């Protein structure tokens, strides 16, 4: 073969390699480097062969890295699927925990609070709207959550709105949502009604909803549809409405401050939560419950109240009800210098607002003179209400099962 034919053959080989590369085929670059031996081919030919060889090496390197990336992506995808399954399982666990937490976290052994719990159990899994009345701090939202999480709507949202916290203009945009472009710079926003679709809408302090807003909300209850502010397209909605008020809505209706037709719509079932001062026997259980929770959160052990401090707490009227009691216990646990909380650790309002510790009236002494007797009675009632189930009794008392066991041993009640 003459020298002039060698480049032609070589060029044809390089063209073939180039076509293979364009089709995704990657020949071995080693033969190309053999063409670069000095003196075999003219310099331009060897340079061209070397360039092709280097290109092939880079392509192989890139392909190797791509294969590594693909393998890592496959592994990452498998890990993502495992994580998704884990998150789904955790979500199911959290959903179950929410159900149990709110369905079973109403503490009290008094007849009044047991009546409330009984009402919750009856109405929870129905479609009925419920009105919850009671003073501020009695736990109206807790009752609403108990109803929701014990119902078939539990897997869907529980959406709360405090009607007293917003002026009329903002209240309606929060409630109904707003369309984009209603005003300069305003974007589309979903309202609480839409957020609660298939779930539960909780309207706290509904007595403070303006009359104009009441009329618009009444349409939602009657037609199960609404329009966003600035919108013209009706939006269908399926929701259950739970309302709460610290005012007597019948009086509000009589005085013209609340629409009668809306009142009858939201008051299909009424649950009244009595103030704490009317169920003194529950105060002791609530003190134990909040002390245990606060001690756990603040990582303190064996926290308890002295007898004199407990008497003051039991004799106080608690105008702020459970919310005030909870705040007081949290404060005491946080600031007490020892594991036994004494009178000096209580806030001034408790020390000044409680009935005297040693008054001549026997009526006050009957509640506080014997804390051990009060505790034993609470233990017996909780066990009786729980049908002897110690875990359930401990929950009702707001203590751990181990705490219940120790108390039963202390009072020689372990066999009960």
Image (cartoon, grey):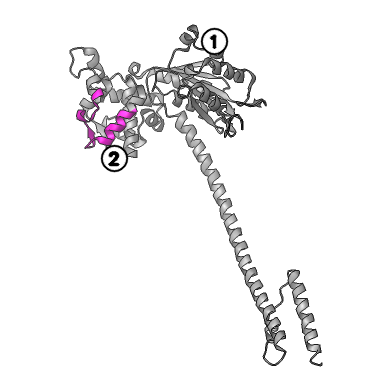
Verify whether residue 338 appears in magenta: yes
Question: Where does label 1 land, which residue?
Answer: 260
Seen in the image, is 20 located left or right of residue 292?
right
Is disc 2 surrounded by few (<14), some (14 to 19) or many (20+) residues within 10 Å? some
Q: Which mark is residue 156?
A: none
Q: Secondary structure at mark 1?
A: helix
The magenta segment: 326-349
In this rendering, does residue 415 appear at all? no
Question: Where does label 2 land, which residue?
Answer: 300
Q: Position of residue 400 (x, y in %)?
A: 36, 35
Verify whether residue 30 appears in magenta: no
> The C terminus appears in which quarter of the rendering?
top left
Seen in the image, is 83 located left or right of residue 66?
left
> The N terminus appears in which quarter of the rendering?
bottom right
Q: Residue at x 24, y 37 (%)?
A: 339
Q: Main secondary structure of the magenta part?
A: helix
Q: Position of residue 398 (x, y in %)?
A: 36, 30
Q: Residue at x 32, y 26 (%)?
A: 325
Work out how far the residue at label 2 is from the one at label 1, CA to CA, in angstroms: 52 Å
- Number of marks: 2
Seen in the picture, residue 280 relative to 250 is either above or below; the reply is below
């Amino acid at each position: 073969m003459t020298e002039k034919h060698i480049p032609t053959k070589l060029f044809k080989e390089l063209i073939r390699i180039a076509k293979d590369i364009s089709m995704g085929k990657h020949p071995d670059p080693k033969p190309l480097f053999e063409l670069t031996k000095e003196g075999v081919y003219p310099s331009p030919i060897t340079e061209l062969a070397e360039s092709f060889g280097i290109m092939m090496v880079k392509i192989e390197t890139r392909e190797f890295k791509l294969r590594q990336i693909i393998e890592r992506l496959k592994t990452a995808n498998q890990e993502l699927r495992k994580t998704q399954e884990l998150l789904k399982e955790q979500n199911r666990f959290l959903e179950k925990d929410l159900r149990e937490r709110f369905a079973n976290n109403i503490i009290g052994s008094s007849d009044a609070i047991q009546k409330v719990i009984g009402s919750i159990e009856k109405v929870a899994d129905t479609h009925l709207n419920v009105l919850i009345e009671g003073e501020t701090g009695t736990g109206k939202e807790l009752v609403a959550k108990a109803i929701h999480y014990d119902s078939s709507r539990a897997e869907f949202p529980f959406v709360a709105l405090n009607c007293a916290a917003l002026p009329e203009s903002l209240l309606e945009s929060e409630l109904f949502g707003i369309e984009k472009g209603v005003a300069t710079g305003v974007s589309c926003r979903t309202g609480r009604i839409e957020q609660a679709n298939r779930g539960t809408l909780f309207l706290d302090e509904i007595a403070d909803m303006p009359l104009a807003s009441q009329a618009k909300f009444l349409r939602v209850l009657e037609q199960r549809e609404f329009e966003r502010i600035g919108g013209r397209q009706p939006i269908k909605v399926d929701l259950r409405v739970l309302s709460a008020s610290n005012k007597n809505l019948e009086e509000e209706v009589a005085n013209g401050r609340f629409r009668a037709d809306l009142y009858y719509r939201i008051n299909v079932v009424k649950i009244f939560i009595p103030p704490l001062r009317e169920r003194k026997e529950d105060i002791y259980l609530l003190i134990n419950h909040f002390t245990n929770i606060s001690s756990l959160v603040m990582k303190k052990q064996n926290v308890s109240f002295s007898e004199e401090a407990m008497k003051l707490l039991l004799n106080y009227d608690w105008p702020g009800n459970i919310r005030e009691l909870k705040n007081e216990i949290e404060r005491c646990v946080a600031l007490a210098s020892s594991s036994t909380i004494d009178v000096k650790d209580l806030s001034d309002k408790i020390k000044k607002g409680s009935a005297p510790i040693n008054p001549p009236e026997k009526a006050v002494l009957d509640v506080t003179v014997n804390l051990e007797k009060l505790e034993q009675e609470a233990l017996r009632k909780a066990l009786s209400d729980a049908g002897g189930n110690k875990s359930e009794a401990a929950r009702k008392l707001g203590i751990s099962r181990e705490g219940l066991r120790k108390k039963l041993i202390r009072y020689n009640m372990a066999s009960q």
